[in-house]
Amino acid sequence: MLSQVTENPCFGGWPSPARARFLRVFLEIQKPRLCKVIRVLAFAYPYTWDSLPIFYRLFLFPGDSAQNEATSYHQKHMIMTLLASFLYSAHLPERLAPGRFDYIGHSHQLFHVCVILATHMQMEAILLDKTLRKEWLLATSKPFSFSQIAGAILLCIIFSLSNIIYFSAALYRIPKPELHKKET
């Protein structure tokens, strides 16, 4: 089953939430640990990729502009995200007391609470950064021209449409299963 998934052009490539969902449904019984790892990676990979600029700024950037009031919000955002992924992957607290957290306090509920708090911290950090670093950013970088902005939007549209066309065409290339005829 796994080889059919990875050879299929619709599911090959990078880990995505849709791929993790497919693997969870079809492989959960056969390989539960593999499915769990793939599910966690499907969300950890995009988070890490999207957070690389913040990681660089907080841990490697040697300038004064990297440290301001927004830094604590960025750190709280990272802590809440790590806590959310830990609670979700470890199935705490229901693992410690089975049956007690079936309705309230389930790890999936705690995951959502932590993610909402992390998103709030991230938005606060962005708003503070936008306010506090405005002069520095304007002094050290040129504003984008209209043609650069239009070009970026056009590239996004082209990539999105090519993605849609590729995966839509891949659906038509999947061979249809042969129906078994009843023998009389």
Image: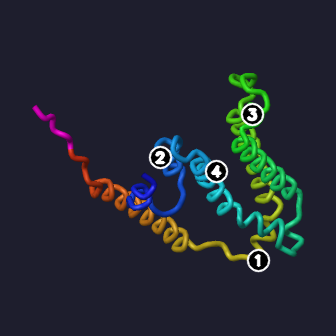
Expressed as whole percent of the image width and height from the top left, the position of residue 50 reads 66, 61
How would you rate the neighbour count of disc 3 (Cα within 10 Å): few for under 14, some for 14-19, many for 20 or more? Answer: few
In-front residue for pair 162/33 = 33
Do the CB atoms of the residues marked 1 and 4 lie less than 8 Å apart? no
Q: Which residues are magenta?
A: 179-184
Identity of the amino acid at label 3? Arg
Does the magenta segment cover residue 167? no
Q: Which residue is mark 4?
A: 40
Q: Which residue is mark 3?
A: 95
Q: Which residue is mark 1?
A: 140
Element assignment for label 1? helix
How far apart marks 2 and 4 lie (CA) works out to 14 Å
In-front residue for pair 128/134 = 128
Identity of the amino acid at label 4? Val
Q: Main secondary structure of the magenta part?
A: loop
Residue 22: numbered disc: 2
In-front residue for pair 104/58 = 104
x 85%, y 69%: residue: 65
Q: Is residue 77 above or below residue 116?
A: below
How would you rate the neighbour count of disc 4 (Cα within 10 Å): few for under 14, some for 14-19, many for 20 or more? Answer: some
Do the CB atoms of the residues marked 3 and 2 lie less than 8 Å apart? no
